[in-house]
Image (cartoon, rainbow, N blue to C red):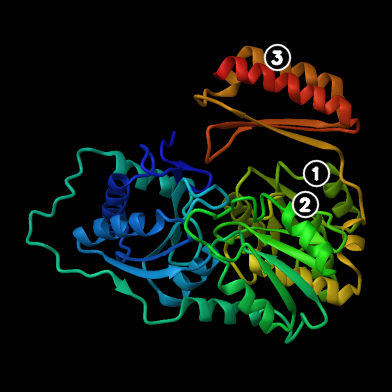
Amino acid sequence: MKKLFGTDGIRGIVNEANMNVELALRFGQSLVVYCQKNNIAPIIFISRDTRGSGPMLEMAVSAGIMSLGGKAVSSGIIPTPGLAFMVKQMGVGMGLMVSASHNDYSYNGFKLFKNDGTKMNEQEEEELENIILNDEFDFSTGKEFVNSDLEIVDVQPIKEYAEFLIKALPEKVGENFKIVLDCANGATAEVAPIVFEQIGADIVTIADCPDGKNINDDCGSQYTANLSRKVVEEGAHLGLAFDGDGDRMIAVAEDGSVLTGDQLLYIYAQLLLELEHFTNKIVVSTVMSNINFINNLKKLGIEHVVTEVGDRAVFQAMQEREAVIGGEESGHIIFSKHQTTGDGILSGLMLVWAMKIFGKSLSEMSNQFSLAPKVLVNVPVKEKTSLDLIPEIVEEIRQAEEVLQETGRILVRYSGTENLCRIMVEGENETQINKIAEAIALIVNEKLN
């Protein structure tokens, strides 16, 4: 079982055990060893979001790379999907994003991309982790100092990434749209306004002044209240909220209502059908998807493929089934004809295109089906003991499933990035599912704290 890697790279509170300068240095050295063992050029393209700890960790991991003769190439601040795009463009060995995604500034982390722009699989992460944690590896070269500088790229990542996004849509598709962009004081703050202005939209931006500490602070895809108010206040057609590293997006309709990832996926599925871009009519999403979303896809003649949580799991299933669209309820949406990972800005562009094609408001498009009532409860835990090994939790879930029978479902799992146990209960009766979730949360808290 992996100790460092979660569902999306390595993440932790800065200057604590799982995310500090010492680990970053070791991580950089281990990347070079991993590349050498797998016949990969040890040229690592590094990007980061706007966290104050980003430069420190970037320099530490770069020092580790250079200490073993590898080459560290810095792009500065760009969104995670921008890094995935640039890695493919530049032909480097690997890409490294220094980010903790939607978490607050006290967290940071490392996300890795292979030279084809895809994320490492479980086995590859395990191999790298074994190198990081193996004290038998001698990371000292025993040679003279390696004369290697941190290279600053001579390309313009923001410009190239923006051009790539704009070319994915018809010219000026955003004309006659007023859009509010919530950039989460993160990695999209510079590039998102450029892109949406270039497609002809009238834009208003909020949370676009990062200071190192305000990333995801009451803004972005996790906190949409300010965006909802601004959309209504401005009379905008829609609002788009990105997370700190720009790989997810949550949309707000003109009436201030917030769309889920499932509602977005349904709209995108209709768009692809209309454009005749839906080669095999498959949508991939995770176990968190709403049952009514799945049933309504079937009414459109679309097959639904379910995966574990995480956009990497979604993308792997998309590759296996040659699906062109997939995503998570949290707002990670992957358009495989364009990207290898979730891309918040691309998702926003595709939503504008759908509104243009169908000539409907976003509230109309989001109300095509009702979502089954769902409750989500996060319980902080001290340890992540296998839930199957705790009889009281197993029994509580079993009894709840008997109550729900075929009218709902329960999912209890650990977060892949935080010390949390996530409890999801879905059903027809909101009062009933709230009681079930509270009862399970009580047992989880009792047994794991």
Kindly report which numbered mark, 2 or 3, lies closer to the viewer in this rendering.
2
Report, in whole angstroms, how far the alpha carbon at label 2 lies from the one at label 3. Answer: 31 Å
Kindly report which numbered mark, 2 or 1, lies closer to the viewer in this rendering.
2
Q: In the drawing, does residue 377 fall left or right of residue 14?
A: right
Q: Is residue 297 above or below residue 206?
A: above
Three-letter amino acid code at the position of disc 1: Asn
Three-letter amino acid code at the position of disc 3: Glu
Residue 312 at x, y = what percent? Answer: 57, 52
In what quadrant of the picture does the N terminus appear? top left
Which circle marks residue 260 in the picture? 2
Upstream in sequence: badge 2 or badge 1: 2
Residue 321 at x, y = what percent? Answer: 67, 57
Q: Dividing the picture into quarters, in which one does residue 366 lie? A: bottom right
Callout 2 crowding tier (Cα within 10 Å): few <14, some 14–19, many ≥20 = many
Query: Relative to the observer, which residue lies in front, 157 or 275?
Result: 157
Which circle marks residue 290 in the picture? 1
Badge 3 element: helix
Upstream in sequence: badge 1 or badge 3: 1
Residue 149 can be seen in this image: yes
